[in-house]
Image: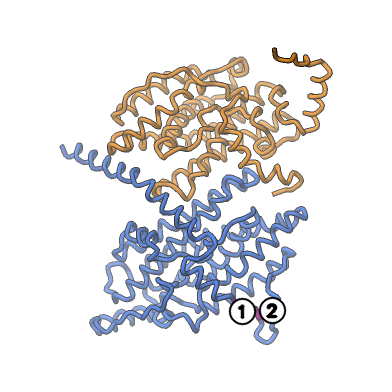
Chain colours: A blue, B orange
Amino acid sequence: MYTTELKEQGGKVAPVSIVSEDPELVAAFEARVAADEFIEPKDWMPEAYRRTLVRQISQHAHSEIVGMLPEGNWLTRAPSLRRKAILLAKVQDEGGHGLYLYCAAETLGTSREEMIEALHAGKAKYSTIFNYPTLTWADIGAIGWLVDGAAIMNQVPLQRTSYGPYARAMIRVCKEESFHQRQGYEIMMTLGAGTAEQKAMAQDALNRWWWPSLMMFGPPDADSPNSAQGFRWRIKRDSNDDLRRKFVDATVPQAEFLGLTIPDPDLRWNAEKEGYDFGEIDWEEFYAVVRGEGPTARERMKARRDAWEQGAWVREAADAHEAKRRARLAA
Amino acid sequence: MAPSLPTIQPGDVANAEKARAGGSFDAGEAVEHHGALFDYLLRLGDDSLILGQRLTEWCGHAPALEIDLSLANIGLDLIGQASLFLNLAGEVEGKGRDGDRLAFHRDVLAFRNCLLVEQPNGDFAQTIARQFLFSTMQLSLFERLTGSSDHRIAEIAAKAVKEVRYHAELASDWVVRLGDGTEESRRRMVDGLDWFWRFVDEMFQSDEIEQSLTRAGIAVDRAELRQGFDATVGNVLRDATLPLPEYPRALTGGRIGHHGEHLGHLLATMQYLPRTYPDAVW
């Protein structure tokens, strides 16, 4: 559902030195990347490239998994059988995305268990957006429309990212995300055409999700320390601010079509740049949420840890049974 | 000595009937008879709906990602079956109610699911025990319903039987894994099955409604499914190295709307939006 590079501990991360690597191997690697070739798991790669990718892909996988929770919050209360089935299929897709992404990251030599433990220990991050609560059914529409919309903006360029398994996972993920965005927008259209209470619900959801959605693109370019190397290695292909502008330009007319007002008094069309000018994002809030201080951050992490810890006996049983089965086959 | 209570007069009954027609007194629906077929379709649809609803509660909280995906898959299939059966029920009833109306605007007494499916998820072993018992029954039921003389039921069963075969396999595999896994998983699997044995017999009971439909070739005599069910349960439990149950005295009532305490809470959650905003379309 999402990627932006988040600083692991909320502080500055120094770019990893590649000085210690064999300069010939580095040069050959960089030439391949510059020629838009895909790097595959068995290929040589700089350690910093590997670490950046593990961080980014695992953050992306964690975001998919944690992202199941705010929408899962409405599965038992979806207002029709059709909505229930669509939402369940969508949340299941997010789980599937998490699975491909963990697999893609595992090709870099880090196990799924290690990544999950890093998440539960608070060492690995996930998208800030999932630390906000889903209060009404309209939030399910707003998440599909805005959050998945922002995710698509971020992820379409990643289909051409330099690491093959990640790029291929993104192709499949993007196809499904565009279906998710359409279902979210369709919920918003139904609410927009509905009763006064439904319209109010839709507007309120937009009011609450708008700014957090803009934050999904990550810190402003000036404060994005890992970007330069990310561009050189084609892990990243567009800047945070460019993607954010693109998202605003695409989304404002969609809100107008719904009859909803974007909660930004500074939003206006700029004919000269042929795009929208918009207000300042509350970066203090963004960094607070990155640090784990978002409104539902503790609940989200508790839910994940509980699921993992309370499910340990099941995973152990599956392993134990498999071992017994193999022993019987060998006997 | 207790005070005497007024006897219900014929006029009171007539008033209650009017209240029901006005839609303000759901409980009254339980005594309505829209025909055996309508009731039978509710039984089929409600079993799937209520179990599907229970499975959605797992989403995002399962012991492993793969299990999360499997449970969501089963839930999706069940909700799909519920839509088909309940829409058909509404059509048969002919009063303009569709599947959503039936799912979201009936109260406890009008639900026709068996007691097993409304039971809370418990731990993963309980969820698997419930799924194993239900899917094993549902598989043999749908296999036979593919031959129903009502082609609409036969078509739904033919579509659903492929899904249910997977549900039954997945659940049996887990019964075996947990039964023959670790000491803890074995204990939990034994407890999980033990918790649900009292609901098994109800799934195989039939009444005049089902018997009349069975005579017409529309429904299936549930009693005939029991032998196959017992054989499958016996085989799976043997593979799982688990003891065979002695079935306790059966609990029943679901098919006539006399449910346990859990269903009301499930419905309160599931129906909250359409009930809170009765004029809204979603």
The furthest residue to the top? B1
Which is more N-terminal, label 1 or label 2? 2
* Residue type for callout 1: Glu
Q: Quadrant of residue B266?
A: top right
Where A9 sits versus A184, above or below? below
* Residue B169 shown left or right of residue B3 in the figure: left
* Residue type for callout 2: Asp
Write the start and end of the magenta stretch as one range. A275-281
- Residue B138 is labelled as none
Residue drawn at point x = 34 percent, y = 22 percent: B244
Residue A75, horizontal then vertical, whole percent: 57, 47
The furthest residue to the left? A331
Residue drawn at point x = 55 percent, y = 51 percent: A73
* Residue A205 shown left or right of residue A115 in the figure: right
Q: Chain of mark 1?
A: A
Residue B261, horizontal then vertical, whole percent: 57, 30
Mark 2 and mark 1: Cα distance apart in space: 9 Å
Residue B158, horizontal then vertical, whole percent: 53, 33
Q: Are marks 2 and 1 in contact (CB under 8 Å)?
A: yes
How many residues crowd mark 1 within 10 Å: few (<14), some (14–19), many (20+)? few
Of residues B204 and A167, the one nearer the viewer is B204
Q: Which residue is mark 2?
A: A266
Quarter of the figure with the C terminus of chain A: top left
